[in-house]
Amino acid sequence: MSLSAIASFGKKLLFLAEQVDKNAEEIKALRQELSTLTEFTHKIARVVQRNQDRAVDKEEILVLKLKNALSELENRLLTSDQVGNGNDGNGSRPEIEPSEK
């Protein structure tokens, strides 16, 4: 092997060693970025889950309020129906006078 071939091989070897070091630094930086992004993604997932849980809670509360309102309306309708039929609501019926002949 000639001296120029050895020098060329040495230059290539040094260049490749520099590239390996540079790539190792870039990989380290990319790993850190990936770690940061992963942590951020987990935080977002937790926030989204909390928001979904709150939405479900609000929906359940609205359903309960609607059921309550319907029950109150039903009770009022039953009460007004009993009063309209002459029923005082305590189970007794008004006395009916016999008609005169």
Image (spheres, grey):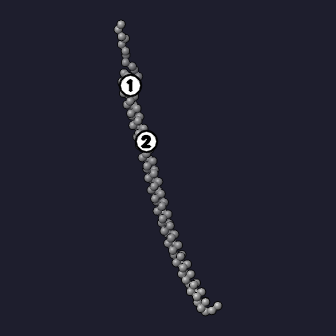
Q: CA distance from mark 1 to mark 2?
A: 28 Å
> In x, y percent, where is residue 81?
38, 26
Q: Is residue 72 left or right of residue 8?
A: left
Q: Residues within 10 Å of mark 1 (few under 14, many from 20)?
A: some
Q: Which mark is residue 63?
A: 2
Q: Which residue is pictured at 36% across the width and 27% down the height?
A: 80
Please, what is the three-letter code of the amino acid marked with disc 2?
Val
Q: Which residue is pictured at 47% across the width and 57% down the height?
A: 45
Q: Is residue 36 left or right of residue 86?
A: right
Please, what is the three-letter code of the amino acid marked with disc 1?
Gln
Q: Is residue 16 above or below residue 41?
A: below
Circle 2 SS class: helix
Circle 1 SS class: helix
Residue lying at the far bottom of the rendered structure = 3
Q: Is residue 75 above or below residue 37?
A: above
Q: Is residue 85 above or below residue 45?
A: above
Q: Badge 1 is on which residue?
A: 82
Q: Which residue is pictured at 49% across the width and 69% down the height?
A: 32
Q: Residue 91 is drawn in which quadrant?
A: top left
